[in-house]
Amino acid sequence: MAASVSITTGPEVPGSRKEVYGVITFDSSYATGGEAVTLAQLGLSRLDYLVVTAGIGYLPTWDGSLTTPKVLLYRQTAATSAFIEVPSTTDMSATTVRFLAIGA
């Protein structure tokens, strides 16, 4: 399965770059290393930067890839209060995060 992406605004064109705003919905079987999203899903042909905002109870991060981006989800453990990645195959289909993608 793959994450689904819903674009809410964009692409806008500030200068020579596009800005796309939207929502990423995770799928029913989270993949270790993050959920892949394609540049086409983000409404871009080139990614310069991706910002993801916190989903309730989870901390999302972008893996930094400009060509095959992934969004990782972390949760806080009760035992140590440390953040760990959500375990593989966890059903995250009710989890959404908002994003801002910048590129071309």
Image: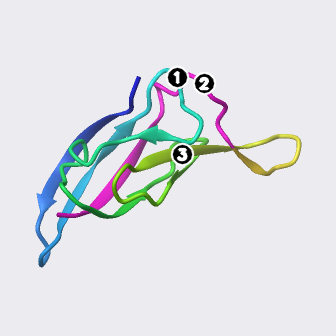
Q: Which image quarter: residue 27?
A: top left
Magenta span: 85-104
- Name the residue that disc number 1 marks: 29
Residue 81: image location, x then y, percent: 81, 50
> Mark 2 or 3 closer to N-term?
3
- Picture coordinates of residue 87 (x, y %)? 67, 31
- Location of the C terminus by quadrant is bottom left
Mark 1 and mark 2: Cα distance apart in space: 5 Å
Q: Are marks 1 and 3 in contact (CB under 8 Å)?
A: no
Q: Residue at x 14, y 55 (%)?
A: 10
Secondary structure found at label 1? loop
Amino acid carrying mark 3 in the image: Leu
Front position in the image: 47 or 90: 47
Placement of 8 over or under 86, stated as above or below: below
Q: Nearer the viewer, residue 47 or 74?
A: 47
Q: Residue at x 35, y 53 (%)?
A: 99
Magenta highlight on residue 98: yes
Between the residue at mark 1 and the residue at mark 3, the CA separation in whole angstroms equals 13 Å
Decide: few, some or many residues near mark 3? Use Cα within 10 Å; few <14, some 14-19, many ≥20.
many
Q: Is residue 103 left or right of residue 66?
A: left
31 is higher (above) or lower (below) than 36: above
> Secondary structure under badge 2?
loop
Q: Quadrant of residue 74?
A: top right
Total numbered circles:
3
Is residue 93 on the magenta stretch? yes
Residue at the spot of label 2: 90
Expressed as whole percent of the image width and height from the top left, the position of residue 9 reads 17, 52
Ranked by sequence position, the earlier of labels 1 and 2 is: 1
Q: Mark 2: which amino acid?
A: Thr
- The residue at which mark 3 appears reads as 72
